[in-house]
Amino acid sequence: MIYLDNAATTEPNEKALARAVEFTKKNYLNPSALYGGAVSSALKEARESIVSKIADPAQFELVFTSGGTEADNQALLTCGRRNVVLSAGEHAAVYEAGVHLKNGGTELRLAPIGKDGSADPEKLLALVDDRTSLVSVVHVNNETGAVNDIFRLAEQVKKKNPRCVFHSDGVQAFGKLPVRLTKDVDLYSVSSHKIGGLKGTGALVKRKGFALQAFLHGGGQEGNLRSGTENVLGALDFAYAAEEKFKTLKEDFARLEGYRERLWQALDKEIYRRISPPNGSPYILTVAAQGLRGEILQRLCLEREVIVGTGSACSSKKPYSRVIEACGYGKDLLNGVVRLSFSLRTTEEEIAAAAQALNASAQELKIRIG
Amino acid sequence: MEKVIIIRYAEIHLKGKNRGYFERTLCVNLERALKGIRHELHRTSGRYLIANFEDAQTEEICERVSRVFGVHSYSVGLCVPYDTDSIYRAAKEVCPREGSFKVVTHRAEKKYPMTSMELSAHIGGRLLDDFPELRVDVHDPEHTVCLDIRENGTALVFGKFERGAGGMPVGTSGKGLLLISGGIDSPVAGYMMAKRGMTVELLHFHSYPYTNDGAKEKVKELARLLSRYSVSGKLTTLNVAHIQEEIHAKCAAELNVTLLRRFMFRLAEKVAKEMNAKCLVTGESLGQVASQTIEGITSSNAVVSLPVLRPLIGFDKDEIVLVAKKIGTFETSVLPYEDCCTVFLPDFPAIKPKLSFIEEEEKKLDVEALMREAMASKEVFLL
C-alpha cells in the first residue's frame, strides 16, 4: 500500500518512540511532585529542544498541549476580543475558534486568499486597525501547501498595531520548512504526529514575556498556562521525533520538491488541475480532477493500493472544502480535490505508481459516469 | 416468597384454535430474548412466568422482555402460597408506604374460601393498620396492589403493570424482506412489521465506489439495533452502482430515481423469493420525496408480483421520527453518511412520471444483464 496522506498523519518514528517509552517506563513519577525531579528535567530538556529547532530558546518557550487544535484554540480564545483578523485559508481549528468568538460578539474579519490558498498580504493588512486584538495566519496551508510569509506579515501587522497579537498555525510547517521565529510572532502552534510523533501531543510556542492566558485551569502545570498532569511520553516522543526529523530537513526539502514536481508532471493534464503553487511546501501537492469527485477517486485509488487524501466528504449539504472554495474555484473543480502529501519514506517508485493509479482511477470514473 | 416476572400477552387471546401455535411461538421468542441469562420460563393459563433468576438481573430481563412482540404487559411480583398470611406478607413488600391505594384481587381458583372482594378488603385492612399514611381510594388510586390467586395453590402479588411491546409474536405472520437504507424511515418500517409478527429479513443497496464503507457500517449498525426486536440476524447487500451509471448515461435525467427504484424492486423480489419471503416491505411515506408519490409507487409496483407493504404510508416525518427515537435507531440514522451519492441525483426529479414514458426509457437498458450483475455482487453479513 502506498500512503500519500501524510499531511493527515504520518508513521511514528520508531527510534524516537522506543526512546520515549524506555524513559517513561522507568520514570513514571509525577513531574510536578517535589520528588519528580528526573521526569521534570527530561521535560525541560524536551521543551528547549523543540523550541531550539525553530527559534532562539532565550526568546521563545512553549506550552505543551494536546495537539495543534488545542494550541490554536488557546491562542484564539484567550487573545481574541474586539476584532480578529484571519485569512480565509485557516485550518478548521483556527477558523471554528474564530466563529466561536464571533458568536460571543467579537468581530471576525476574513482576509481573502489567492487561487493557491495563500493570504493576500495587502488585503489582510487593510483589515487590521487599532482595535484588532489578534491576527492569525496559517504558515503552510494544510489543504494546498501554500506558504505564507508570516514573518513579513507579522512585522507589518505590528507596525500598524503594535498591541495586536500575531499567531500562526505552523502545524504543516514545523519540521518541514526551515523556520526561524522572529520577535513579531507572538504565538506559533505545532503538532507532533505530523512529523513522526504520537497523536495527542502538540505545543503552543510563545515569545518569552508575552502574557498568554491559561485555557485549562487546575494544578498550575506548564507555568500555570495549561493545567493537567504532563503527557510525559507524548512530550518526550515529540522532542525525539523532532530531533530525527530536523536532522535531514534540508535534504528532504529538496528531494520531496523533486518528487512533487515529478508527480505533477506524470498526472494527466486533461483531467487534473494544479492547485498547489510551485513555491509551496514540498510535502503537499493538491490537484483537482475536473468534473469528478475526489472522494470517489480516493476509493478507486484505494483499490489500486494507493491512499490519497481529500479535503471533502460526500455530503449533499456541503460536499466541498471551505478553503478551496475561498480560493475561488468553480463547482467542477471544487468536488474533485485530491491532496497528495509525502513523508520521508515516500520513494520515487511510489510517486510513479501513485501517478498511474490517479490517472487510471480518473479514466475509469470518467468512463463510468459518462 | 419468590421473585417472579409475570408476562401477559396481547392479542393472542383473540385467536381460536390456533392459540397454541401463537403461544408456543411467543415462548420461543421469549427464550431467545433471554438467551444467556439464567431463568426458568413457565407457561400457565393466560400468562408466562419467569422464575429462578438472579435478583440483580431483574432489570435486564425486564428490558429484554419489553422488546418482545406479543407481550401486552409485564410485572415484577412475588409468588407465594395462597394462604392469607403469606399473601399479606407479600402484599406488604409491594405496597407503597403512603398515598392512596386499592387492592384488586383476581381469582382463577374459584374454590378459594374468600371472594375477591373479601380478600381485597381483608388484605387492604391489614395494610392500612401497618401504614397509617396510606388511605384507600377505589376510584382513582395512586397505587394498586394486585393479588392473582392461581389454581395451583399459589398467589401472584404485584404492584405495577409495565407496558410491553404489544403486537404479535414474531414468526406468526410469515416472512417479509425489508429494503433498508441508512435513513430514518426504513428501520421504523421493519419494526412495525416485526411488531405485527412478521419475520423481517433485510436487504440493502449500496453503490460502491460512489458510497463509502461508512454508509455500509451504518446500515449494519441499524440492522443490529433492529435485531433486538427479533428482526433477522443477517443483512444482505447488493451493489447497484453500475445500474446507476447506465441509467445516468442512457436515460432521461428526471427519471434517474424512478428507474433505479424499479431495479431495486425487481432485485428485491428475486432475493425475497430466494429466502422464501412472501412480501417486500419499504419505508415509503406518501409524498415524502419525489419517488414516493402515487405515480412513483405505481411505477415500482408494476415490476413486481409480490405484495409490497408500506407500513409508514400515512405517517408524517415527525411521527416516524418519534418511533425511530423510541426504538433507538434515530441516532444512528442521522449519522452523516450518504447511502446514495449525489452524483446521480437529478436537479429536478419527475414527481408524476408516466408509466409509458418510464417503460420507453427503460428499453434503452439491458435490464436482465444489469440484474444478473447486481445479483452477483450479493454479500451477506451476519450481525
Image (cartoon, coloured by chain):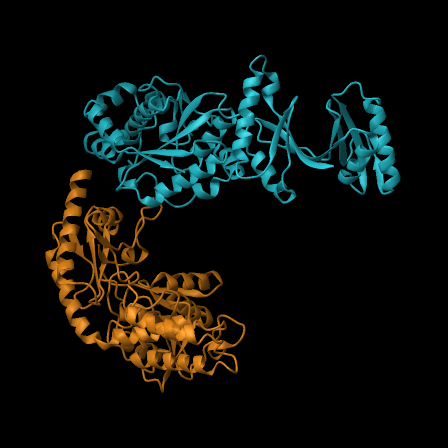
Chain colours: A orange, B cyan
Residue B283 shown left or right of residue B24 in the figure: left
For the N terminus of chain A, the image quarter is bottom left
Residue at figure coordinates x 76%, y 24% from the top left: B106
Q: Quadrant of residue A99?
A: bottom left
Q: Residue furthest right?
A: B129
Residue B276 shown left or right of residue B112 in the figure: left
For the C terminus of chain A, the image quarter is top left
Q: Quadrant of residue B185?
A: top left
Residue at figure coordinates x 16%, y 66% from the top left: A278
Residue A311 position in % (x across, y down): 29, 55
Front position in the image: A311 or A176: A176
Can residue A203 be seen here? The reply is no
Residue B121 position in % (x across, y down): 85, 29
Can residue A294 be seen here? The reply is yes
Residue A173 position in % (x across, y down): 28, 70
Query: Above or below — where is A165 with respect to B267?
Result: below
